[in-house]
Amino acid sequence: MRLLVFVFTLTLAACGARPNEDFIDIEAIQSLEQGVDHDLPLIAQAYSIKSSELCEKEGGTWKQNGSKQSTICVLPAIDAGNVCSDSSQCTVACVAKSDNVTAGTNVEGMCLESTDLFNCPIYVSKGVAEQSMCAN
């Protein structure tokens, strides 16, 4: 019985204990919640952003997109419009300059202007047009 009273007393004492004020760093938690890992590819950065405030802070546009009208952050690509022959040469992707391109033909591409992938671009891989892929 004495052991039970002792354990009960210790439990009550522990309930009243306060953590060290340095234990919870609110600013560190907020910076984690509001930051973007710039080591990630640009598309991954865009999809990791969950608020309009952070999107705009990163230079993006918060918009509804796709057939489900999902709200996403669209970030601009720094190499938009640059000539390319493969997506490995672009921040986002290399796409054909024209929509009137037959898959399998040799084409010159250009780097996509943003992380907005909700359309039907013709991607260019190793200088060759791929089949058009529509993302909704």
Image (cartoon, helix red, strand yellow):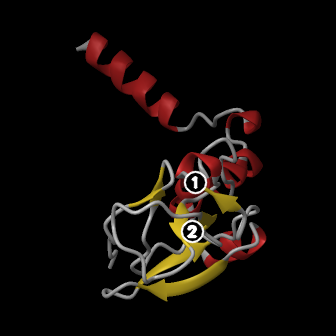
Which residue is at a point 76% across and 35% down the rendered structure image? Answer: 22
Which residue is at a point 66% across and 72% down the rendered structure image? Answer: 55
Viewer-nearest of discs 2 and 1? 1
Q: Quadrant of the C terminus?
A: bottom left
Tell me the amino acid under the disc marked 2.
Thr
Along the viewing direction, whichever of 92 and 53 lies nearer the viewer:
92
How many marks are shown on the rendered structure?
Answer: 2
Which residue is at a point 63% across and 54% down the rendered structure image? Answer: 90
Q: Quadrant of residue 45?
A: bottom right
Seen in the image, is 57 located left or right of residue 7? right
Secondary structure, mark 2, is loop
Secondary structure, mark 1, is loop
Residue at the spot of label 2 = 115
Residue 67, compared with residue 91, is above or below; it is below
Q: Quadrant of the N terminus?
A: top left
Residue 19, compared with residue 33, is above or below; it is above
The residue positioned farthest toward the left in the image shown = 1
Residue at the spot of label 1 = 85
Q: How far across and how far down the image is residue 112, in percent? A: 60, 69
Seen in the image, is 8 located left or right of residue 47? left
Q: How far across and how far down the image is residue 84, in percent? A: 63, 57
Q: How far across and how far down the image is residue 91, in percent? A: 64, 55
Alpha-carbon span between mark 2 and mark 1: 18 Å
Mark 2 or mark 1: whose residue is earlier in sequence: 1
Along the viewing direction, whichever of 114 and 51 lies nearer the viewer:
114
Tell me the amino acid under the disc marked 1.
Ser
